Amino acid sequence: MKPGNRPQTSSDLPIWGTRRLRPYLRLHSIRALTLVEVSVSVALLGLVFATAIGTLTILNKNAVSTRLMTNVREIVQRNIETAVAVPFTSANVPAILALTSPSGAAWDEGIAGNNPVTIYTSRDGTMTMTGTLLRIVAAEPNAVSGDIRRVTFRLDYTLYGRNLSYQLATIRANDQ
């Protein structure tokens, strides 16, 4: 070996090349986050947050729609049950069973005294949803010429700009 080409020992190397310092340098570079990594993380969190907000908005809209539909069904069912339960004879025809035109007549239920009918009122009273309750009563043809009537209640309302309605019908015969 030539005198200038002797093998170097660790004591001949500069301090940043020693084995004692290398683990520290690697550990230090692993702990740092780059701007790209932080940006990608923030973007992913924003995407998750936006998706969650969108999902909660849709779920709230569906809950409102379901709540209103339940109230509408209850109002129509209540009127059908009243029409079935009221005494009905040829001498005493209650107003709920009086014949109407084929297009129906507005019905006020006798609760609020007017039509439109209140479907929903918010707890604080700031929002009210109303609809129009129609009653259609028609004579039902039959073989024995009995006084049989088809009673239909339909509640029309608007939700999110869409016109909706719910309808139930029943058959009612004279009690005699």
Image (cartoon, rainbow, N blue to C red):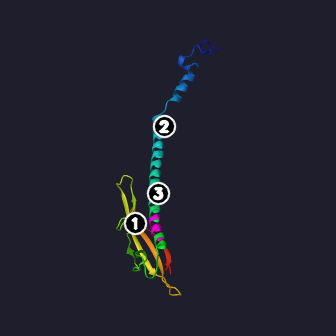
Q: Secondary structure at mark 2?
A: helix
Residue 167 visible in this rendered orientation of the protein:
no
**Is 23 or 103 nearer to us in this picture?**
103
Q: Is residue 36 above or below residue 84?
A: above
Q: Secondary structure at mark 3?
A: helix
Identify the residue at image location x=47%, y=71%.
Answer: 80
Identify the residue at image location x=47%, y=78%.
Answer: 150
Identify the residue at image location x=47%, y=51%.
Answer: 55
Q: Quadrant of residue 95?
A: bottom left
Q: Is residue 109 above or below residue 171?
A: above
The numbered disc on residue 37 is 2
Q: Which residue is mark 3?
A: 62
Q: Which residue is mark 1?
A: 157
Position of residue 122 measured from the top left corner of the image (x, y, whole percent): 39, 55
The numbered disc on residue 92 is none
Q: Is residue 76 magenta?
A: yes
Instruction: Give how far apart the Cα atoms at labels 3 and 2 are.
Output: 38 Å
Residue positioned most to the right: 1
Specify which label sits upstream in the sequence, 1 or 3: 3
Q: Is residue 176 above or below residue 61?
A: below
Q: Which residues are magenta?
A: 74-80
Instruction: Give how far apart the Cα atoms at labels 1 and 3 are.
Output: 16 Å
Specify the quadrant that holds the N terminus. Answer: top right
Q: Taken as a whole, is the magenta stretch helix, strand or loop?
A: helix
Q: Quick check: marks 2 and 1 in contact, CB under 8 Å?
A: no
Q: Secondary structure at mark 1?
A: strand
Q: Residues within 10 Å of mark 1 (few under 14, many from 20)?
A: many
Q: Residues within 10 Å of mark 3 (few under 14, many from 20)?
A: few
Amino acid tagged 3: Asn
Amino acid tagged 1: Tyr
